[in-house]
Image (cartoon, rainbow, N blue to C red):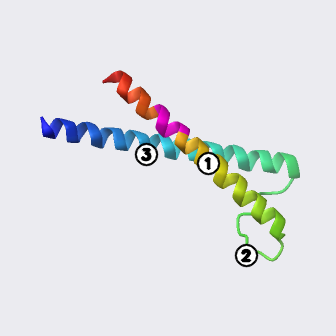
Amino acid sequence: MATMRRREQTSLHLLTAVAGLGAALAVRSALDRGYQRKTGRSPPKNPADPTVPWRSALLWSVSVGALVGVAKTAARKGATAGWQRLR
C-alpha cells in the first residue's frame, strides 16, 4: 500500500514538473516572438552586453520572470487538479 502511494506521488511530481516546464517554454517562446514582432529586434539575452540598455534588460527580466512564474504555477495547479480527478 505504501509503495503504491509513493508511486502515485512520484508520478504526480513528474507530471507537475513536465507541465510546468512545458508552460515555461511555451510562454518564453511566445514572449520572444512578441518582442521581436513589436520591436524588430531580438530580446536582450545577455544583460551584460554593452549594447543593451538597463531599462530594456530590467523590463525584459521582470516580464519574463513574472509571466513564466504565473504560467508554471497555473500549469502545475491544473496538472494536480487533473490528476486528482483521474484518481
Q: Residues within 10 Å of mark 1 (few under 14, many from 20)?
A: many
Residue 39: give x, y in percent of width and height: 87, 52
Say above or below: 56 vs 66.
below
79 left or right of 26 in image? left
**Residue at point 31%, 39% (across, down):** 11
**Residue at point 60%, 44% (across, down):** 70
Residue 53: give x, y in percent of width and height: 84, 69
Q: Main secondary structure of the magenta part?
A: helix
Total numbered labels placed on residues in the image: 3
**CA distance separating discs 2 and 1:** 22 Å
Query: Mark 3 belongs to which amino acid?
Result: Ala
44 left or right of 20 in image? right
Answer whether residue 38 is magenta in the image.
no
Residue found farthest to the right: 39
Which region of the structure is painted magenta? 74-78
Q: Residue tagged by mark 1?
A: 68
Q: Quadrant of the N terminus?
A: top left
| Circle number at residue 17 | 3
Instruction: Please tell me whether mark 2 or mark 1 is closer to you in this view.
Output: 1
Q: In this orientation, does residue 25 appear?
A: no
| Circle number at residue 36 | none
65 vs 49, nearest the viewer: 65
Say above or below: 55 vs 11.
below
Residue found farthest to the left: 1
**Residue at point 66%, 47% (across, down):** 67
User: Pointer 3 and pointer 1: residues touching (CB < 8 Å)?
Assistant: no
